[in-house]
Image: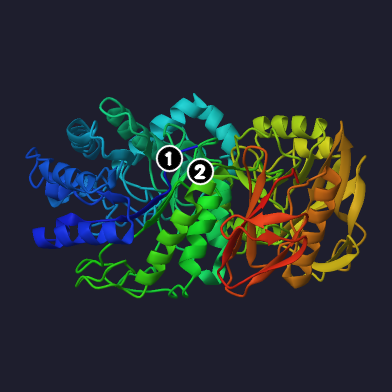
């Protein structure tokens, strides 16, 4: 199950003199840093002039780290192309939605689809891979850095040409594109693929199909860029390959990691919204199923840049983050960054050491993380996380659709994490799975905020239900076609017939006075909604007041051994959260979910399984302390003390590992 939990930091030796580098390595060993991530901004150091490439600086640092017992994650430096590549070449630069051409500086200023950039990227990546690919100290490759974190789709000429090629491959004929997009509206009809524009500024809005398809095109091209680098590295290295993603970036995670070996991500969520930190564990362990993921960046104290800084971590929170990460499937806990930057745009970002080499406000918390890592390492490595029985579908295609059609400024990341927070607080062990994931092992499936449901997903979800699963569909799910148009056979397309409903109306329910009644509760209803007439299904939630009283907003329909539940509208506010929670708990019980606890809000439980025993890793994440009911006699693994059945208290940001010698 692995031989080590990694505790690391990002390091930038190119900024420091020899004496400082020597001191830094010494301090790293004292703190317990066993892995260092380097190289992502190193291009101009390795190739100061075109074709004058020297990798010796990087190799020397890897050697020195390895000699001191520290392993290395090597990053490819393609996020920050040097000045010789961009100066005087606006055609190579990223162009945003307003047509603004980026300038040299910062990062992500060059278009990753530009042919010349891609050629130079291939060359520098190959030189690095040839030089250090077989080094025993290199344990992981990270491609680029936070791809598409600052920029989204590019509108340059290179992208325009690729866009037209992509359209030809997808639609074959221009008549087919016109038919699928419905371009007779507003005289948008095209006579050739070359006439199809990029979604640059227009007086009002672009056709929904054009906007969404351009986002999907861009996501695919970004994945191709990553795949190309991975293929080069694999010629020279056997070390696994990843990149550092985020659910906030303009990428399709499923496609981006398809050709990579392990999942890696960054997270800077603070203690005020700890659930936005925890949600990542439940997603990223499913990006490359069966493999530990890598947390590649998080702050030891606070994030920050010249224009902002968020709240600093309270003492104890960093340790809680680390224990939660390790126990939920992470192979690593890595800080950005080791030594505070003395220049650039992120000088005020939290670090382990200050720019002048002294411990920072987060330093003692880093020491606490290392103490905890040593304390839990053997336990974590000898167990594995239990398979959750509840799955929430995460879809970057859905995110692309919602960018085009956000209604009242809806944000996919905010919607999915908001729903996740409610489910987290139920104490049910859960997964966020990708749209194409296997549904085996789950009993309850949620498909929220997914405008378009593919035939493939529908087929797999239906098979899941027929075998006995319960599938909750919605809200805001199924109302659009693959091309981001409206269904013409039924409001929700094929979903309606298999769910036993007929959609009577779709409309924005916000502010209409509509109240939903379900599960013995009442709550206001909001968001773009579908209201149902039952055509074989049973009404579970009924609307009172508003424009459509008496219609159903929640239905259920038996299919095979299971059930399809349609959630047509979003219960909102405190009452809405109670109703969603009640709905989840109701169907979790009906589905026979057993992996759940009555853990108090703000505390989480990671259930893990060993050889003939189970453990619970209990972590308080909100600083308020918490409790959970211990179902049978157990032992605190760390202290060796018995833990009696009953309510068990845990302190602020504390963690405990409880062992049960019987199956729960």
Asked whether the beta carbons under mark 1 and mark 2 sit within 8 Å of each other, the answer is yes
Rate crowding at label 1 as few (under 14), some (14 to 19) or many (20 or more) other CA atoms within 10 Å.
Answer: few
Where is residue 169 drawn, in percent x and y?
A: 45, 26
Q: Please give the name of the residue rendered at 44% of the width and 27% of the height, measured from the top-left corner.
A: 168
Q: Please give the name of the residue rendered at 20% of the width and 37% of the height, measured from the top-left corner.
A: 128
Q: Which residue is mark 1?
A: 3
Look at the numbered disc 2 and give the secondary structure of its residue. helix
Q: Residue 196's image quarter?
A: top left
- In-front residue for pair 497/645: 645
Q: CA distance from mark 1 to mark 2?
A: 7 Å
620 to the left or right of 319: right
Q: Is residue 601 above or below residue 477?
A: below
398 to the left or right of 210: right
Where is residue 167 drawn, in percent x and y?
A: 45, 32
Where is residue 487 drawn, in percent x and y?
A: 71, 40
Where is residue 259 drawn, in percent x and y?
A: 42, 31
- Residue 156 in view of the camera: yes
Q: Residue 51's image quarter?
A: top left
Q: Which residue is mark 2?
A: 381
218 to the left or right of 70: right
Q: Is residue 535 above or below residue 604?
A: above
Q: Residue 557's image quarter?
A: top right
């Amino acid at each position: 199950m692995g031989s080590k939990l990694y505790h690391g930091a990002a390091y930038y030796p190119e900024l420091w003199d020899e004496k400082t580098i020597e001191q830094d390595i010494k301090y790293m060993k004292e703190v317990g840093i066993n892995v260092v991530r380097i190289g992502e901004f190193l291009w101009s150091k390795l190739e100061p002039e075109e074709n004058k490439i020297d990798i010796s600086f990087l190799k020397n640092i890897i050697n020195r780290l390895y000699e001191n017992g520290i392993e290395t994650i090597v990053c490819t430096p393609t996020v920050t192309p040097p000045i010789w590549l961009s100066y005087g070449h606006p055609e190579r630069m990223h162009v945003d939605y307003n047509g603004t051409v980026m300038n040299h500086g910062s990062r992500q200023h060059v278009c990753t689809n530009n042919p010349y950039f891609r050629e130079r990227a291939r060359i520098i990546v190959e030189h690095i891979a040839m030089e250090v690919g077989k080094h025993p100290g290199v344990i992981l490759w990270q491609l680029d850095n936070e791809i598409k974190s600052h920029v989204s789709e590019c509108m340059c000429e290179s992208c325009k040409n690729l866009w037209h090629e992509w359209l030809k491959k997808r639609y074959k004929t221009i008549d087919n594109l016109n038919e699928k997009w419905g371009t007779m509206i507003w005289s948008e009809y095209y006579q050739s693929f070359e006439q199809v524009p990029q979604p640059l500024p227009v007086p009002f809005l672009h056709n929904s199909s054009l906007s969404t398809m351009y986002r999907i095109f861009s996501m695919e091209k970004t994945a191709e860029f990553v795949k190309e680098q991975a293929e080069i590295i694999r010629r020279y290295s056997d070390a696994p390959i990843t990149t550092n993603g985020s659910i906030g970036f303009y990428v399709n995670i499923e496609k981006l990691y398809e050709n990579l070996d392990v999942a890696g991500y960054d997270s800077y969520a603070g203690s005020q919204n700890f659930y936005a930190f925890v949600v990542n564990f439940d997603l990223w362990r499913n990006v490359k199923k069966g493999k530990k993921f890598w947390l590649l960046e998080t702050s030891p104290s606070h994030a920050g840049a010249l224009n902002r800084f968020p709240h600093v971590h309270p003492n104890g929170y960093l340790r809680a983050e680390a224990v939660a990460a390790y126990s939920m499937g992470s192979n690593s806990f890595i800080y950005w960054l080791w030594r505070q930057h003395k220049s650039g745009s992120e000088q005020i970002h939290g670090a382990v050491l200050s720019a002048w080499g002294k411990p920072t406000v987060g330093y003692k918390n880093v020491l606490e993380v290392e103490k905890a890592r040593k304390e839990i390492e053997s336990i974590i490595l000898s167990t594995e996380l239990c398979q959750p029985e509840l799955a929430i579908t995460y879809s970057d295609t859905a995110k692309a659709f919602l960018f085009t059609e956000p209604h009242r400024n809806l944000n996919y990341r905010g919607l999915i994490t908001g729903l996740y927070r409610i489910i987290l607080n139920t104490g049910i062990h859960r997964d966020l799975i990708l749209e194409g994931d296997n549904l085996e092992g789950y009993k309850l499936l949620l498909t929220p905020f997914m405008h378009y449901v593919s035939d493939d997903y529908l087929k797999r979800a239906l098979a899941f239900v027929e075998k006995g699963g319960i599938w909750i569909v919605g809200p805001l799910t199924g109302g659009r076609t693959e091309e981001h148009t409206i269904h013409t056979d039924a409001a929700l397309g094929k979903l309606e017939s298999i769910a036993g409903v007929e959609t009577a109306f779709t409309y924005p329910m916000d502010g209409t006075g509509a109240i939903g009644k379900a599960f013995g509760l009442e709550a206001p209803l909001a968001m773009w909604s579908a209201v149902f007439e039952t055509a074989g299904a049973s009404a579970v939630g009924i609307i009172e007041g508003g424009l459509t009283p008496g219609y159903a907003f929640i239905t259920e329909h038996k299919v095979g051994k299971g059930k399809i539940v349609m959630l047509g509208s979003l219960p909102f506010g405190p009452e809405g959260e109670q109703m969603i929670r009640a709905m989840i708990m109701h169907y979790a019980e009906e589905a026979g979910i057993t992996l759940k606890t009555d853990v108090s809000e703000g505390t989480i439980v990671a259930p893990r399984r060993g050889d003939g025993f189970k453990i619970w890793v209990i972590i308080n994440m909100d600083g308020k302390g918490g409790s959970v009911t211990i179902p049978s006699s157990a032992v605190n693994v760390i202290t060796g003390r018995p833990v009696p059945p009953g309510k068990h208290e845990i302190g602020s940001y504390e963690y405990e590992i409880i062992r049960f010698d019987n199956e729960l």
